[in-house]
Amino acid sequence: MANNPGDFRNPKIQDTGKKSSGGIGKWIGIAVAALVALLLVLWLLGAFGNDETAIETDNPDAVNVPAN
């Protein structure tokens, strides 16, 4: 018999395979996923479309060729 029967350690009882998963990698993944989702929504709403920007052509030095 053991010297101290109250000090019984059974390795089958302890769960050593369980690991806490709340590290910084999880938060980086959440931030990247949120950024990708935000960019996708903006793209679907047309924020990255080809904007038809008006170009100023009122240059007095420009030569205007009349149409026939």
Image (cartoon, rainbow, N blue to C red):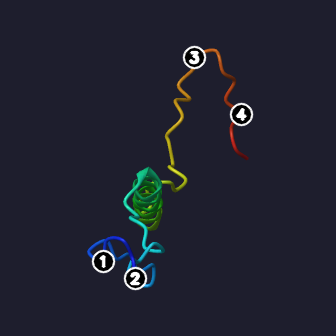
Residue pictured at 71% horizontal, 33% vertical? 65
Q: CA distance from mark 4 to mark 2?
A: 111 Å
Q: Which residue is mark 3?
A: 60
Indicate the amino acid at tag 4.
Val
66 vs 20, left or right, is: right
Task: Identify the image quadrant of the N terminus.
Answer: bottom left
Indicate the amino acid at tag 2.
Met
| Residue 39 position by quadrant | bottom left
Q: Which residue is mark 1?
A: 5
- Verify CB contact (< 8 Å) between mark 1 and mark 2: yes
Please tell me whether mark 1 sits on a helix, a strand or a loop. Answer: loop
Q: Nearer the viewer, mark 3 or mark 4?
A: 3
Q: Which residue is mark 2?
A: 1
Is 65 placed above or below 5 here? above
Q: Residues within 10 Å of mark 1 (few under 14, many from 20)?
A: few
Q: How many marks?
A: 4
Indicate the amino acid at tag 1.
Pro
Q: Which residue is mark 4?
A: 65
Q: Nearer the viewer, mark 3 or mark 2?
A: 2
Q: CA distance from mark 4 to mark 1?
A: 107 Å
Seen from the viewer's position, the closer of residues 7 and 1 is 1
Indicate the amino acid at tag 3.
Pro
Please tell me whether mark 4 sits on a helix, a strand or a loop. Answer: loop
Seen from the viewer's position, the closer of residues 37 and 14 is 14
- Verify CB contact (< 8 Å) between mark 4 and mark 2: no
Q: CA distance from mark 1 to mark 2?
A: 8 Å
Q: Which callout, 4 or 1, points at the residue further toward the start of the chain?
A: 1
From the top left corner, tell me how far across and down residue 33 is, in percent.
45, 62
17 vs 45, left or right, is: right
Residue at the farthest left position: 6
